[in-house]
Amino acid sequence: MNDDFVTAGVNLQFHYAAGAAASRFLCALRDEQKIFGARCPECRRVLAPARSFCPRCFVETNEWLEVGPGGTLSAFVAPPFAQLLEPALTLALIRLDGADTAFVHRLGEFDAPMLRRGLRVAPVFAASRQGHILDLAYFKPVEFDNAHSI
Ligand SMILES: [Zn+2]
């Protein structure tokens, strides 16, 4: 604190409606362990996660399709402490098979030296799923495309 400001944190927990597209997307993760994208009728890009509209064309999407489950690592941030966490986690941009956009999620079960653009990854779903983005717990490096449960 100085003479003019008080520094404080506020931790707010709240519930909100995810919306039709996000709800459908999250229910598919929870109930089917499937990842859905939506194709834009104008630019034909497959947006993943699925969205109700294309942010480039500003038109509604109406064609949903399953993407992944495997994908390719496009970029990642690996802080020095990432491997001290259990499981080791870092943030990544993943281009899911069949999608044209990057999917932001976590990486786990990796050794830092193996991380590189183009690395093949597959999802690891949480054993207990609740309709949350972390029902897909993280992606892990693989040599093949298979989904796994933890
Ligand atoms: Zn579009």
Image (spheres, rainbow, N blue to C red):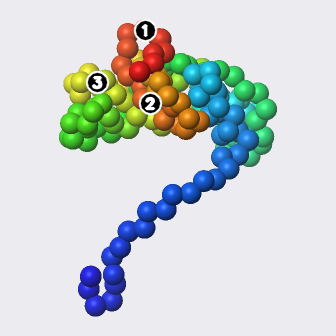
Q: Earlier in the sequence, mark 1 or mark 2?
A: 2
Q: Is residue 33 above or below residue 4?
A: above
Q: Which one is in front, 74 or 112?
A: 112
Ligand 1 within 8 angstroms of badge 1 C-beta:
no
Judge the density around disc 1: few (<14), some (14-19), many (≥20) Cα neighbours within 10 Å: few
Residue at x 33% of width, y 76% of height: 7
Label 2 sits on residue: 137
Q: How many marks?
A: 3
Q: Which one is in front, 41 or 115?
A: 115
Q: In the current view of this chain or complex, which residue is farthest to the top?
A: 144
| Mark pair 3, 1: CA separation | 15 Å
Judge the density around disc 3: few (<14), some (14-19), many (≥20) Cα neighbours within 10 Å: some
Q: If the image is split into quadrants, where does the C terminus sit?
A: top left
Q: Earlier in the sequence, mark 3 or mark 2?
A: 3
Q: Is residue 56 above or below residue 144?
A: below
| Mark pair 3, 2: CA separation | 14 Å
Please tell me whether mark 1 sits on a helix, a strand or a loop: loop
Label 3 sits on residue: 110
Q: Is residue 18 above or below residue 4?
A: above
Q: Which mark is residue 91?
A: none
Residue 101: x, y in percent?
56, 33
Q: In which quarter of the view is residue 42 placed?
A: top right
Residue type highlighted by circle 2: Ala
Q: Earlier in the sequence, mark 3 or mark 1?
A: 3
Residue type highlighted by circle 1: Phe
Q: Which one is in front, 17 or 117?
A: 17
Label 1 sits on residue: 144
Q: Are marks 3 and 1 in contact (CB under 8 Å)?
A: no
Residue 51 seen:
no
Judge the density around disc 2: few (<14), some (14-19), many (≥20) Cα neighbours within 10 Å: many
